[in-house]
Each structure stands twice: as structure tokens, then as C-alpha cells.
Amino acid sequence: MGKIAVTPEPSSRSASVPDPSRAAHLAAFQQLQQSGQMPEAAAHLARALDLRSFVTLPFRGSVPVARVLVLQSILAGNVLMHRFLNDRLFAVHVLLVEFWQPGTPLPEHDLVFNAIGDADVRQEALALAERILQHTSAPLLNPPSAVLPTSRASNADRLRLLPGLRTANTARVNRSDLAADSLAEVLLRHRLSFPMLVRAPGFHMGQNCLLVHEEAQLHDALEQLPGDELLLMEYLDARSPDGCWRKYRVLFLDGQLYPVHLAVSRHWKVHYFSAEMAGSAPHREEDAQFLAGMQAVLGSVGIATLDRLQRALGLDYGGVDFGLGADGRILLFEANANMAVIRPPGEAIWEYRRPAVERIYEAFHRMLLHRVCAPWPSDSATASGAVAARC
């Protein structure tokens, strides 16, 4: 993760006359990329390839309902936004924050969505987004200031006292701190013990995340995981009495809770794509019951806990992955803006999922329209003609 493959586009300059400036920027890009300085590397890549800071996506409608400016990083860690932005309703400009140069005008827009969502690895990109946002007064969704505190370690600390919620003691440490002579002190300071999770920041869907039960396994894990910094996390056991692990996902959207899925697995590392769902009708029935009646499954106390969590996060679009403890508490796995909602495949066995997913897509569209319309009266000269007509 984090590497950028480069296939330079042909430039207008003759191939027989190399551009020394372009070559210097490419050399700087490659050097900075190798040393892990990705934001600086991306800036040199932009200059080398003469890239613009924003890209306009194809619009297939007649008149856009709203013009949306999406802020993204050229690196990983972005919210999967484009699936929500119907290209017959919304005209979309994507601004790559590392490529933006001060003084460059922003494309015309009615709304800004900050899609930089991974606070564990994209702090620099979020800081760049903050500077860019000083040049617009349009309504903003998912401000960087709300995304920044959602790293795994920050969430574990700031959400610890929320009633009904259990967070995992979490520490971000340098791998050199995990040497045999310093490990005990590190674990004591951060209230950690075996078993625990060890993971590389910035990876998702279980990638580069290992469960270690003893010190010998930890040293083996260090050989497998990339990066100079690692996350140590208390292992929250979400195993049910039937021996399966269950992971719930709930989306936080414009102040409301929406069930996304319930995944059931016989392995502790449970994700919907790898869980035993396609081959198990009983597991799909559990999923269907959760989607159709989240409150009945979680109870009023569980729903109240999720509502408190949503308000604590303060995201316009975000969500939570969690399990249920034996004491009924919500076991927080992660809560941030990087929660994907993917339409189900076409097979008949997934039809039960479609209404819940479509409700989320419709709610997302309503949120955009509400945010665009709310600041401006229908006769405002500030809004685009299409927005004024719709509002």
C-alpha cells in the first residue's frame, strides 16, 4: 500500500527533447517514494506529469442537481464516494489535495465532500484539505477536523467512557519499542497483555492484522508486518455461545443509523466478504433479521449506545464495525468515515439485502440536496441555476 505506479503520458514536448525539469521531478518522486515520504512524492509526481489538481468526472444527465467538489488524497485512505454520486444527478469534480497549488482556482461547486477518511495514515492530506477549504464557503460534509480524531488509538481513548461501549486499549508504537528488553514496559504502560492484535496502520479488511497469543508469536508477527510503526490492540472477544464470531456494521448518515450488514464466521477475523454467508442460509437469515429490525436485534440500550457514538464522532458520513460482548456492551472494532456500502451481487440469495442498501443510497442523496438547499433561498444568485430550481 502507498506505492504509486507511474506510466507517464506522452507530453506535447518532442520525445527527442527531454525536459530536464520533468526528469528532476520524476527523480525526486522516486526517491521520496522509496523513503516513505508520500505527500512530498505525490507533489513531485504532479509536476513531473503536468497533472491538474482536479478531475471532472463524466456527467450523463441534462442539468446537474448539484455540483459536488470531492477532496481526495492521491494515496489510499479515501471514502468510496463515487458509487453514491449518481452521474445523472450530480456533476462531480475530484480534487487531489497533494497536487493542489495555492492560488489555483477551485472548480465551480455547490457542495464540498471531504473524502479523505483514514486518520491513521492521512494526517498530512487532511491538513492540506483544511488549507484548501479556506478558499470556499460552500456547505461542507465530513470536515477534516471531524475526521482527524477517528484514528484507532484516538477513538480508543476518547470514546472509552461512553456508556454501553467497550473500546480496546490501543497503542501506536515504533517496532523498535517491541524489543525483548522493552516489551514488558510498553505493555504495562498501555494496559495491554496477550492475546492482542498487532496491525500495520492504514490497512483494512483484515490485511496486515495478526492475533498473537504470546511473546514468541509477536516476534514472528513483526517479521510479517510492514512499516516502522504498528498498532497494538487489546483483543475484544466477540465469539458467541455457538462458537461463531459476529461483526455488525451500522452506518451513521446525516444523524441517522442505518444497518449495513451482520457477518457470521467461524474465524476471529470476520469480514462480510470472507464470512460464511453465501453458503449458509441460517447466517443469511440472521443478516436479514438485522437489516429488517436492527432495534429488535440490538435492543434499546444498544441503539442508544450507537446514537451516543454517532454524536461523539460528529461525522456526516461514517459508521462503526462492532461485536456484542457477553455483558451486552457494544465492542468497538473501528468507527470512522471509511465505511463502505456496496450494492449486493445479482444472485437471488442476496435480494433480501437490496432494500436496506437502497435506503442508504437514497438517504445519501437526500443529505446532499438538503445541505445544498439549506444555506440558500430559492432565488439566491449564489447557487447554481439547477440548485436554485430544485430548492
Image (cartoon, rainbow, N blue to C red):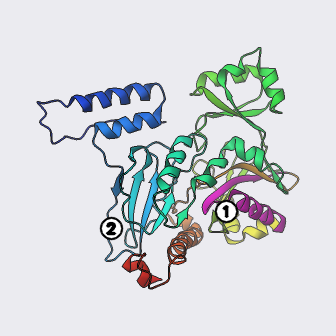
| N-terminal label among 2 and 1 | 2
Q: Is residue 341 left or right of residue 14?
A: right
Using the rendered image of the protein, determine whether residue 24 is visible from the camera's viewpoint: yes
Tell me the magenta residue range: 300-325
Assign a secondary structure to mark 1.
Answer: helix
Asked if the magenta segment contains residue 323, the reply would be: yes
Residue in the picture at 73% in, 19% down: 216
Which of these two is toward me, 332 or 274? 332
Q: Position of residue 330 (x, y in %)?
A: 79, 54
Residue carrying label 1: 287
Disc marking residue 59: 2
The relative height of residue 43 versus residue 129 in the rendered view (above or below) is above
Assign a secondary structure to mark 2.
Answer: loop
Q: Position of residue 2 (x, y in %)?
A: 47, 36
Q: Is residue 180 left or right of residue 275?
A: right
Whole-number angstrom distance, CA of label 2 to CA of label 1:
36 Å
Label 1 Cα crowd, 10 Å radius (few <14 / some 14-19 / many 20+): many
> Amino acid under label 2?
Phe
Q: Position of residue 147 (x, y in %)?
A: 61, 52
> Amino acid under label 1?
Asp
Label 2 Cα crowd, 10 Å radius (few <14 / some 14-19 / many 20+): some
Using the rendered image of the protein, determine whether residue 298 is visible from the camera's viewpoint: no
Which of these two is toward me, 30 or 379? 379
